Amino acid sequence: MILKPVKFVVLTAAGTMIVGGILFGRDAFSYISSSARSVRMAVEESVPVEFQLRRARDLVNDIVPEMHANVRLIAAQEVEIAALKADIEQSRKQLADERVRVARLRDSLATDQTSFTFGDLSYTRDQVKQDLARRFEMMKEAEIVLAGKQRLLENRTRSLGAAMQALERTRSQKALLESQIAALEGQNQLVKAASMGAGGTFAIDNSKLAQSEKLIADIKKQLDVAERVLAHQSKFVQPIEVDVVSEKDLLKEVNEHLASSPLQTARR
């Protein structure tokens, strides 16, 4: 039952094409395309101007929910950036404290003592050496993690700035479109009044409407801007087991690293 209408349509279309080919020859396709274009233009011209203006205003109003969504996204990014800044500040403080402890152990091993007392506990020289090696590795890894967090903060800050600029541009373009639509509505009312006064027909230039619709399409593309980056929380890694540590090489490496580092040891 379903195949019969389909066969009828196919046969009718085929028959039309065959008849057109016989009557018009190679120009048949040109005649068909010209006819379709004429029908399309006639339909577009028959659409009332008021309807096109209302459609343009609806398109502009459709931007509002997307703007609100981007505002919420910007607010979320601001909260994440604030949390990342606090995390970086805490990491800097912990790293500075660790540098002080490393420097103190280094200074202890720079003496000829065979045992050392920290707090109420005593440690052999080998124990201090092992602890210095472990802390030194942890400190270098913490410096790498901190540098990564700082780069992440810079990227997020740039992304937030770009999103805020895009939102501001969207607001300006929305206001411009609304003013253009209002001007077109006023122009349409004037043309209608003049037409009724003259008792004739009238026409209106739709070029501004086309421009408005193009701007709206551009705005919808610009509103799809946002990039969310997840902060990777990093803490000090577990102590690295060191089987054999050269005290001379260890002290040399620690001295060179502390001397070249931009952070200053606040206390020994």
Image: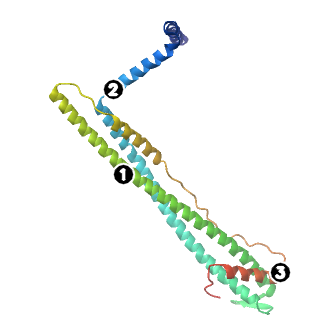
Counting residues from the N terminus, which is met first, the one under dot 1 or under dot 2?
2
Q: Nearer the viewer, mark 3 or mark 2?
A: 2
Query: What is the distance, in whole Å, between disc 3 and disc 2 at their CAs?
Result: 90 Å
Depicted 50 relative to depicted 144: above or below: above
Indicate the amino acid at tag 2: Glu
Q: Which residue is mark 1?
A: 172
Indicate the amino acid at tag 1: Ser
Q: Residue at x 56, y 69 (%)?
A: 87
- Along the viewing direction, whichever of 255 and 117 lies nearer the viewer: 255
Q: Residue at x 68, y 79 (%)?
A: 260
Depicted 253 relative to depicted 55: above or below: below
- Along the viewing direction, whichever of 193 and 156 lies nearer the viewer: 193
Counting residues from the N terminus, which is met first, the one under dot 1 or under dot 3?
1
User: Which structural element holds mark 2?
Assistant: helix
Q: Residue at x 69, y 86 (%)?
A: 104
How many residues crowd around disc 3 within 10 Å: few (fewer than 14), some, or many (20 or more)? few
How many residues crowd around disc 1 within 10 Å: few (fewer than 14), some, or many (20 or more)? few
Counting residues from the N terminus, which is met first, the one under dot 3 or under dot 2?
2
Q: Which mark is residue 246?
A: 3
- Along the viewing direction, whichever of 116 and 171 lies nearer the viewer: 171
Whether the residues at callouts 3 and 2 have beta carbons within 8 Å, the answer is: no
User: Which structural element holds mark 1?
Assistant: helix
Q: Is residue 27 left or right of residue 212?
A: right
